[in-house]
Amino acid sequence: MKTHQYPVDLTDEQIEEFGNELEAIRNEVFDSRGDRDRAYILKVIKTQRTMAVSARFIIYLSLFFIPAWGHALAAWPVMLTILGLGVFMLGIAKILENMEIAHNVLHAQWDWMKDPEIQSNTWEWDTMSPSDRWMHSHNVVHHTWTNVLEKDLDVGYGIMRVTPMQKWKPAFLLQPIYFILLLQGMAAGGQGLHRLAAGGGAGGDPDFLLRVLLAAAGVRDSGWRQCGGQPDPQHLGVHHYLLRALPGRGAQLHPGTGGRRNPWALVSAPDAGFLQHRGWQAVPYPVR
């Protein structure tokens, strides 16, 4: 018998059975947590941080192979090879940090360990959106209204039409360009603006427009607390390989680091991949 109003073709009994199966999986996973899981996340964090630091040293090392130095190995092919290795490593470090570590930590996946260094309420990550605002827009808004049009901002991010249920607008003709920009560096800034909108938007946040302008200029939200009140050079259009080697978010828009991390985020991150939570054939639900 079907008495519910959910947009699914299942009986009440089938929904109850499905819920019980999910609960059984959840309990199995919770009961299996232990030392092996703790060792895993600590190893991933150590690997990511070691790779990030080493990559920056390698990028700086490439300076000593510029032909102007005049020594036997000073040649552009050598310099660019070393530089490319450093950029590649830094890109992988960014992927690990954003996708495998921070996303899961901020989902409170590791709170059970009671480790003060790996807690969702203290962790900060290397992206335009501060962790507390991301947790609200993703954990609360997105996971409450997954795939519900006009509720879940992850459906097209407000600038892309990803389902026939979205009303067509002429601006969507430029969608291929938007997508390329997202892939090649604007994902971080777009994510920041997306989180601002999820936090209330123009109607719910009196400082929304100011926050949008600050984010566009490269100044962080939440009191600038993550950038010390200073604009981030990368978001002011300063693109230089060596500047990208600086600590912090310096590599985020680098054509090799952020340019690799951003496409990975768009197709694989639970809050960014258009196919995540949907499956190949599923489509978002309209607001009822």
Image (cartoon, rainbow, N blue to C red):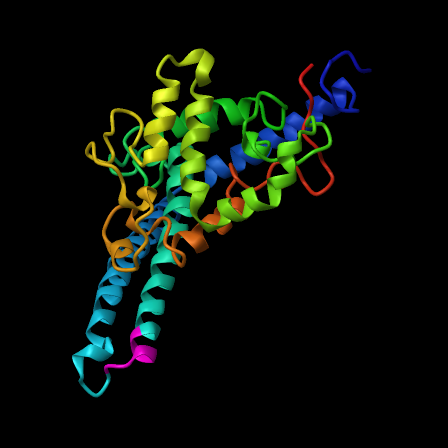
> Does any portion of residue 84 appear in the rendered image?
yes
Q: Position of residue 279 (x, y in %)?
A: 67, 40
Q: Nearer the viewer, residue 140 or 167?
A: 167
Left or right, 174 with reference to 40 = right
Is 87 inside the magenta-drawn segment?
no
Write down the quadrant of residue 133 in the picture: top left
Nearer-the-camera pick, 181 or 271: 181
Position of the C terminus, as image quadrant, is: top right
**Residue lying at 42% horizontally and 39% vertically, measured from the top left:** 103
Instruction: Where is residue 123? Give x, y as percent.
Output: 30, 35
**Residue 33 in picture, x, y percent from top left:** 42, 41
Instruction: Tell me which residue sits at (35%, 40%) in the image.
Output: 127
Residues 268 and 15: in front is 268
Left or right? Give the position of 197 relative to 10. Answer: left
Q: Is residue 46 above or below residue 223?
A: below
- The image position of residue 174, as x and y in percent, is 61, 40
Which residue is painted at 32% across and 36% down in the image? Answer: 113
The answer to whether residue 118 is above or below residue 204 is below
Query: Which residue appears farthest toward the right when viewing the image?
Result: 1
Report which quarter residue 137 is drawn in.
Answer: top left
Relative horizontal placement of residue 228, taking residue 82 as reference (left or right): left
> Where are the magenta residues, as a range?
74-79
Query: The N terminus lies in which quarter of the figure?
Result: top right
Q: Residue at x 28, y 49 (%)?
A: 250
Main SS of residues in magenta: helix
Q: Is residue 50 above or below residue 65?
A: above
Question: Is residue 33 among what the camera can see?
Answer: no
